Image: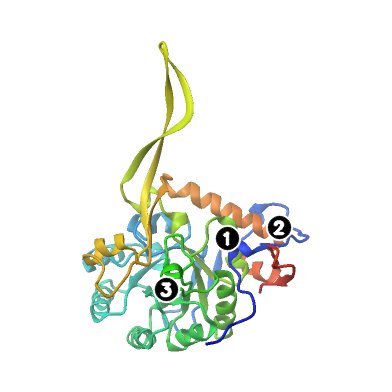
């Protein structure tokens, strides 16, 4: 046993210090980024878009969400629960927007590998991105799966995770991954830190893993922990190449799910004939849950296995309508961050950022890149 004495930081522990800027308007900020991938051996194509991803969670990583976000230049990792025929129909019938902005998601069992092989073979080269997603990216079996997949499919971009430390980020990239997903326990519906005591504060994890990945020519995704546009900006400022969102994109029409209407007394009253009645407000919600929760296990696996416990919670998020307004608000906040930091391009934000530690225990300013 040992203890690391230095503080590790979450998004709530820091703010970005404003700096003198030559930018005249938020509209001058360029949010699109362009990436080439270290291990991908495709036909020379590279990524170009706004590097925000919808998570492969129920209610977020859906076909409808993928098409809506692709239209806006954003990315989606699909849920694992679509069957092979559904995925083949989606990718084979799609245009280049689906190929360039949507990832197939898979686990690491033999059945997962066989299903991926079927979809990959029957989509006629339309499947470019695959997200290999497990809760614990530290197992030897996971690294071996990445090596196997890279050997078999040199012409796919491999996203792999989740991990939170530099050495495992390097291991996955050297095993064949192009993009490493960073985050254990920070998500709004994840209870891994509570149930297991395992985790790593997300801002520090992003800084450490980005440094390791970039040294090898790889990339990272900051996955989880963002509750607002400011957190997304902090993730980019810390060195994330992509930021993956779950809860922030839940509750929209494109995510599906039943809309639940609830009624609340406001505490006000109004006249009703000779009497008074309570004023009742109607609010709409959609169920949202972690993919290791009891709800997810019951939906996809017939319940929790006897050797497992739930590591996620089920909540109700406000119904938000169409995704477009949320994305506009999110991107507007990030553009504003860039103007405060003096970064004309999102690519430059990490180089322009100085984080200020907040709270009584923190009284230092440090560079986060």
Mark 3 lies on a secondary structure that is helix
- From the image, tell me which residue sits under label 1: 231
The image quarter in which residue 109 lies: bottom left
Rate crowding at label 1 as few (under 14), some (14 to 19) or many (20 or more) other CA atoms within 10 Å: many
The numbered mark, 1 or 2, whose residue comes first in the sequence reads 1
User: Quick one: SS at disc 1?
Assistant: helix
**CB under 8 Å between discs 3 and 1:** no
Which one is in front, 130 or 268?
Answer: 268
Position of residue 98 measured from the top left corner of the image (x, y, whole percent): 37, 63
Q: Is residue 262 above or below residue 139?
A: above
Where residue 289 sits, quadrant-wise, is bottom left
Q: Nearer the viewer, mark 3 or mark 1?
A: 3
**Label 3 vs label 1: CA separation?**
25 Å
Which residue is identified by label 2?
340
Q: What label does residue 178 carry, if any?
A: none
The residue lying at 42 percent from left, 83 percent from top is 138
What mark, if any, has residue 196 been given in the picture?
Answer: 3
Seen from the viewer's position, the closer of residues 305 and 215 is 305
- Where residue 276 appears, as percent x and y from the top left, is 43, 18
Asked if residue 78 lies left or right of residue 34, the reply is left
Q: Upstream in the sequence, badge 3 or badge 1?
A: 3
At horizontal 52% and vertical 61% (from top left) the residue drawn is 226
208 is higher (above) or lower (below) than 298: below
Q: CA distance from mark 1 to mark 2?
A: 15 Å
The answer to whether residue 91 is left or right of residue 129 is left
At x 46%, y 73%, the residue is 197
Q: CA distance from mark 3 to mark 2?
A: 39 Å
């Amino acid at each position: 046993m040992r203890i690391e004495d230095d503080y590790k930081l979450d998004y709530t522990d820091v703010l970005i210090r404003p700096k003198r800027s030559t930018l005249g308007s938020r509209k001058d900020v360029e949010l699109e980024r362009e990436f080439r991938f270290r291990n991908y051996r495709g036909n020379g194509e590279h990524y170009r878009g706004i590097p925000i991803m919808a998570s492969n969670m129920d209610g977020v990583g859906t076909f409808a969400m993928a098409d809506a976000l692709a239209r806006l230049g954003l990315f989606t990792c699909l849920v694992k629960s679509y069957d092979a025929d559904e995925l083949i129909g989606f990718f084979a019938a799609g245009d280049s927007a689906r190929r360039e902005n949507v990832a197939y998601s898979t686990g690491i069992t033999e059945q997962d590998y066989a299903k991926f092989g079927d979809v990959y073979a029957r989509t006629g080269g339309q499947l470019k991105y695959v997200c290999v997603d497990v809760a614990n990216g530290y197992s030897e079996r996971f690294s071996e799966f990445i090596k196997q997949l890279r050997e078999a499919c040199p012409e796919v971009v491999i996203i792999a995770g989740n991990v939170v430390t530099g050495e495992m980020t390097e291991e996955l990239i050297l095993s064949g991954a192009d993009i490493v997903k960073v985050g254990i326990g920070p998500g709004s519906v994840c209870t891994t830190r509570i149930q297991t005591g395992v985790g790593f504060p997300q801002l520090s994890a992003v800084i450490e893993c980005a440094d390791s990945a970039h040294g090898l020519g790889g990339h990272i995704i900051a996955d989880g922990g963002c509750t607002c546009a400011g957190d997304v900006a902090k993730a980019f400022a810390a060195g994330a190449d992509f930021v993956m969102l779950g809860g922030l994109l839940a509750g929209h029409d494109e995510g599906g799910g039943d809309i639940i209407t609830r009624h609340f007394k406001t505490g006000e009253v109004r006249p009703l004939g000779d009497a008074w009645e309570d004023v009742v407000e109607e609010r709409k919600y959609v169920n949202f849950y972690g993919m290791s929760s009891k709800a997810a296990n019951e939906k996809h696996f017939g319940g929790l296995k006897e050797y497992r416990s739930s590591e996620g919670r089920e909540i109700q998020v406000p119904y938000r309508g169409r995704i477009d307004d949320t994305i506009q608000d999110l991107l507007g906040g990030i553009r504003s961050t860039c103007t405060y930091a003096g970064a004309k391009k999102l690519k430059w934000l990490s180089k322009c950022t100085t984080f200020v530690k907040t709270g009584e225990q923190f009284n230092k300013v440090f560079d986060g890149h």
